[in-house]
Image (cartoon, grey):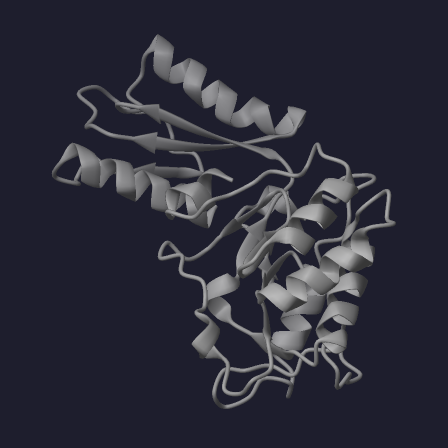
Amino acid sequence: MRAIQGGGLLARDFTKSPVSELALALRSNDGPVWLVEAGSWPLNEALTLFPASYTLSEHPLMCIGATTKPTDSLSDAKIEGEDDPGFAAWQALLSSDAVHSDGGLSIPYGPNDCKKPQPPIFSAYLDASVAEALGERLTNITTLNSQNLTKGLKEAAKSQNAHTMYRPMLNVAYDSRIRCLQVITAIQRGGAERVVLDLVKRLPRVGVKPFLVTTGVSFRASFKQPYQMMDVSGVSDHQSKIRAAGGSNRAN
C-alpha cells in the first residue's frame, strides 16, 4: 500500500474486507485497475498505468507482472498456510521460449492457453471491462486465494477476448513478513547501536524482516556490518538520503 501510494496512485486495501466488497468495486469501477497481492510491492519506482490506447487493437488489455523473491536469504522459508508465491514457476516461465523478442510473453492465462507453468498472479493490470468481468466471477466467492483469483483472471480475460501480456514494469517482490526499516546514525560501538544490531538479529525470529540504514560516519570503532544494511552517509542532502534509503528497502 505505502509503495503504491508513494508512487502517486490511489490505493484501496481489501485485505480485511469480504470478497463481495472487492467484487462490487471491480464491477462498478469505470477505469483500469491494478490488482496487487498483499505482501507484494512494486520493483519499479516510476509507477504508471497503461492508457487505453496502449492496446494495438480494439481488444481490452490484461497485463501481468512476475513475482520475484526479495534479495534476502531468510525469504526461502515457507510460511505454513500461506499461498505459494510461485517464484520458481515464474523463473521457469520467463526463461522459456514463451518470451518474445519484443519482451512480450505467451502467458497461459489468456484465450490461447499453452502448456506452460502457471504461477499465481500477484500483480495484474486490467482494463475496465476485464475488471468488471472479474468482479462478476468473484461475486459468489467467500474466500479469496491466489488459486481462485488466478482462475478468475483467466476466465475474465477469455470472456472479454483480452490481449494478455507480460510487462516487467508490473513486476513485484513478495514477502508476507512485516518489513521494518531501522535508521541510525552509525554502528559505532555503543549502547543504542548494540540494541539496533540485536534487533536486526532477533526480529526475523518473530516474522519481521529488518533492514538497517546508517546516515552518518563512525567516530569510534564500529560493530561488524550486518548483511541487510545500507550506508547513505555519503549522500549529500537529507531528501536524497531518504530516497536512497527508500530505494534500498524497495529492493529488499
198 or 23, nearer to the observer = 23
- Residue plotted at (58% across, 58% down): 68
Estimate the x, y position of residue 124 in percent, counting from the top left.
60, 62
Where does residue 51 sit, x and y in percent of width and height?
43, 69
Query: Residue 28 location, x and y as percent?
Result: 64, 52
Q: Is residue 12 above or below residue 216?
A: below
234 left or right of 7 in image: left
The residue under the point 31% across, 16% down is: 189
Q: On the rendered structure, is 181 left or right of 238?
A: right
**How many callouts does the rendering have?**
0
Q: Is residue 41 left or right of residue 233?
A: right
Please state which of residues 128 and 198 is positioned toward the viewer in this rendering: 128
Residue at point 80%, 47% (across, down): 144
Residue 90: which quarter of the image? bottom right
Asked if residue 171 shows in the view, the reply is yes
Residue at the left extreme, as displayed: 236
Residue 220 sits in which quadrant? Answer: top left
**Vertical side of 193 occupied by 116: above or below:** below
- Does the image show residue 109? no
Nearer the observer, 4 or 184: 4
Residue sitting at 43 percent across and 34 percent down? Answer: 226
Percent across and percent down for residue 64 are 60, 68
